[in-house]
Amino acid sequence: MERNLRAMSASQYDLLIIGGGISGACVAWDASLRGLRVALVEKGDFGGATTSATSKLIHGGLRYLKNLEFGLVRESLRERKTLTRTAPHQIYPLPILCATYRKGPSRKRPLKVGMVLYDLLSLDKSWGVPEEKRISSHRFLSREATLEAAPFLKQEGLTGSFLYYDCQNLFPERHCLSFIQSAAAQGATIANYAEAIDLLISEHHIEGALVRDRLSGAEYEIRATVTANVSGPWADHLLGLCKGVEERRVRRSKGIHVVTRALSPEYGVTVITGKRGHVFSLPWRGHSLIGITDTEFFGDPDDLTVKRKDIEDLLARVNRSFPGARLTAQDVRYSYAGLRPIVDQDVEIVYDASRRYEIYDHEKDEGIRGMVTVVGGKYTTSRNLAEQVVSLVTNKLKHPDPGCRTGRLPIYGGDIQDLPAYTEDAVQRNPFGLPPATCEHLIRTYGTAYKELFTHLESFPEAGEPICDGQPDIQAQIDRAVEREMCLTLSDLLLRRTGIGTLGDPGEDCARRCAEKMGELLSWSPDRVEKELEAFYAKIAVP
């Protein structure tokens, strides 16, 4: 991928996408597959905001059944299967224990109803899915079996647990990047750190956006027949630039997660804590991912942070349900916050709000041509959301529409029919003598595109050396990230091109080694190297 805002400003596009999270990335891939001339700009890094702040799940939304949102759950379950097929190296089944208690909201009988409905809505869950990705229906575990699997659970009143399955996305940032790469391979023009600061308007027609390069400060006009506002929690801010467009208030729910020592290496564990909340522990990369909060956020999305009180409140809730874990602030290796954009204005508390999405055609609603806006949605349904957006755009453009193919085509690196066999073959062939754990890690990260590292491994003997001691990532990944993945900051590398920094401080030696290597590749001054290190440590600091 090549980042060239000047060249983008010299072109005319069918579709300009504002927002490079998972929804914008899916729109870009679908639109480029259908033959549209596509440009995408993202104010930060790809997948760097809401997309990176998920629970790492590709799930049907079991809890939405209490609101009778059968359509949303069915759509989510269908998309769960689709994403498993199109990105087999990135999406994996995850067994989850939902604890049941004698009293309160976790009683066995009502939960049983939900489990049965969940299975009925996903009867086709294993159709056309590789054997290792097939998901079983739920079953009930005894109290003894539950405590054997999750001894940290509150034991008073515990009657057992339901074992059910959803899927885990080990690296949402790279999953999102794979969609971006898929779009670029089809001819889409992409740029990160490119902020839409104004809309180009002529006689009730949006003709594109004025975009500021956040690295150089230069400004460029990027023109397109249709502009898609897919900026998530910032959607209403972008609409505020356009006079005559009806205000679409976006409610924002703040969710925080923390990464701690491992509690349960095999199972996710969740407890319903009340009518308006739940807590969970998910096994993730040898640690536990703990969540979640769901509180309304009223500030500027750019000012979102994790505060010490957020962590204290979350740990207090978790320890009430998982008293045997005895989690303290010292157990927190990494924390992050994200904003979920919500359409629902009627509910009192955002935890109860629907995660549905709405697509607005501003020509139909306000007579302003050339713009569509997406509000709401959830990670799992982003591909289907994109299909509807692109169908609307092709109709507006009167462009011949060959139909959506993203539901059946693998994304960049995902063309693997049998993942275990592919991985075993890669480990055995292994022309550069990499450790088996490193080979497996590279395939989980890149899929078939891991072979693109071979050029670096052939050219530089040190390219196969670990980036950090005890980590499977290798030096060649730094070169690839900078040269082919639009990696422009140290945080891009350590948090989103690799996951080295998302388990906490990788160590001063490792971080500095990465900063200095990027400095060589991008011609950074010594002062810039120090600033990149400062910025990275500010991002991973636990309050």
Image (tube, helix red, strand yellow):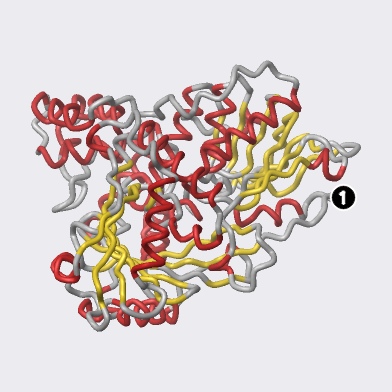
Residue 265 horizontal/vertical position (percent): 18, 59
Residue 370 horizontal/vertical position (percent): 78, 35
Q: Is residue 529 depicted above or below 396 in this figure?
A: below
Q: How many marks?
A: 1
What residue lies at 59% left-to-right and 72% top-to-bottom? 349
Residue 474 horizontal/vertical position (percent): 21, 41
Q: Which residue is mark 1?
A: 244
Q: Is residue 284 depicted above or below 100 in this figure?
A: above
Q: Is 173 on the left or on the right of 358, as rendered? A: left
What residue lies at 42% left-to-right and 54% top-to-bottom? 528
Q: Neighbour class for label 1 at 10 Å: few (<14), some, many (≥20)?
A: few
Residue reaching furthest to the right: 203
Residue 4 can be seen, yes or no: yes
Image quadrant where one finds the C terminus: bottom left
Q: Circle 1 — which element?
A: loop
Q: Is residue 295 depicted above or below 163 in this figure?
A: below
**Most foreground residue, 57 or 493:** 57
Q: Is 531 on the left or on the right of 434, as rendered? A: right
**Most foreground residue, 316 or 477:** 316
Residue 141 horizontal/vertical position (percent): 21, 62
**Most foreground residue, 154 or 444:** 154
Q: Quadrant of residue 477?
A: top left
Residue 504 can be seen, yes or no: no
What residue lies at 42% left-to-right and 35% top-to-bottom? 82
Q: Quadrant of residue 223?
A: top right
